[in-house]
């Protein structure tokens, strides 16, 4: 896989290149983003979400920002362990509105202001931490995996590669997005790759 800046020729130097191994039945998100030092990198995540009991939802936080490991607060309580760049943390929770915040590891110093997120029953809401900590431009983009009460049927992808099946204003209330955030994103986007088993 090779990623180039928009408008670049196909023979130009890629911003980032890498290999994504996709097996039959895989459902993956491949994300080109800034690493902890600000350079471009590629991370892949599995979208296979464990089935949820009735009335529950799931939060998945994926660290795809130019930042050191972070802590994630869910309703004021820290998720177990730090979230490192290119990694994720998940938590099952009751459907409804919950407050999410990001802090520096070992402190209560916020890196992203507390954000109210609506979690629908039977869905997994994937929040990607994006932007740059040194530039004070950290923020979220969202992706929703629906029908998690059964086998996931797929991952809807939104316009311009920012996977948002409904407006972020509806999903994330009270979130102030810095004007520098879009510039900090650079070539960051979310891709969906799925390979089905060949039919007999």
Image: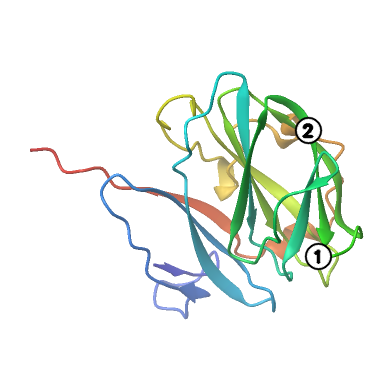
Instruction: Please name the residue that numbered disc 2 is placed on.
Output: 98
Q: Quadrant of residue 58?
A: top right
- Mark 2 vs 1: CB contact within 8 A: no
Q: Position of residue 105 (x, y in %)?
A: 81, 65
Q: Residue at x 54, y 23 (%)?
A: 53
Who is closer to the viewer here, 81 or 34?
81
Q: Quadrant of residue 132?
A: bottom right
**Vertical side of 59 occupied by 73: above or below:** below
Q: Residue furthest right?
A: 109
Direction from residue 119 to residue 156 in the image, left or right:
left
Direction from residue 176 to residue 140 in the image, left or right:
left
> Looking at the image, is mark 2 or mark 1 earlier in the sequence?
2
- Numbered label attached to residue 105: 1
| Distance CA(mark 2)–CA(mark 1) | 21 Å
**Vertical side of 185 occupied by 27: above or below:** above
Q: Position of residue 1 (x, y in %)?
A: 39, 67
Quadrant for the C terminus, please.
top left
Task: Indicate the secondary structure of the residue bearing disc 1.
Answer: loop
Who is closer to the viewer here, 165 or 104?
104
**Vertical side of 85 occupied by 59: above or below:** above
Q: Residue at x 83, y 41 (%)?
A: 115
- Would you call the spot at circle 2 few (<14 residues within 10 Å), some (14-19), or many (20 or more)? some
Q: Position of residue 191 (x, y in %)?
A: 48, 52
Q: Residue furthest top?
A: 54
The mark closer to the camera, 2 or 1, is 1
Task: Indicate the secondary structure of the residue bearing disc 2.
Answer: strand
Who is closer to the viewer here, 150 or 33?
150
Q: Position of residue 179 (x, y in %)?
A: 84, 56
- Would you call the spot at circle 1 few (<14 residues within 10 Å), some (14-19), or many (20 or more)? some
């Amino acid at each position: 896989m090779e990623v180039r800046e928009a408008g670049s020729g196909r023979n130009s130097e890629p911003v980032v290149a890498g290999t994504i191994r996709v097996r039959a039945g895989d459902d993956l998100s491949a994300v080109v983003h800034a690493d902890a030092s600000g350079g471009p990198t590629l991370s892949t995540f599995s979208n296979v979400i464990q089935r949820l009991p009735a009335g529950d939802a799931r939060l998945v936080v994926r660290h795809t920002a130019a930042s050191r490991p972070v802590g994630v607060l869910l309703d004021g309580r820290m998720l177990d362990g730090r979230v490192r760049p290119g990694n994720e943390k998940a938590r099952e929770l009751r459907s409804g509105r919950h407050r999410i915040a990001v802090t520096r590891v070992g402190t209560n110093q916020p890196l992203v202001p507390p954000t109210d997120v609506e979690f629908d029953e039977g869905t997994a809401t994937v929040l990607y931490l994006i932007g740059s900590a040194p530039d004070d431009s950290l923020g979220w983009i969202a992706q929703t995996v629906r029908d998690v009460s059964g086998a996931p049927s797929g991952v809807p992808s939104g316009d311009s590669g920012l996977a948002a099946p409904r407006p972020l204003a509806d999903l994330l209330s009270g979130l102030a997005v810095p004007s520098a955030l879009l510039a900090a994103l650079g070539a960051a986007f979310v891709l969906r790759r799925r390979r089905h088993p060949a039919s007999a």
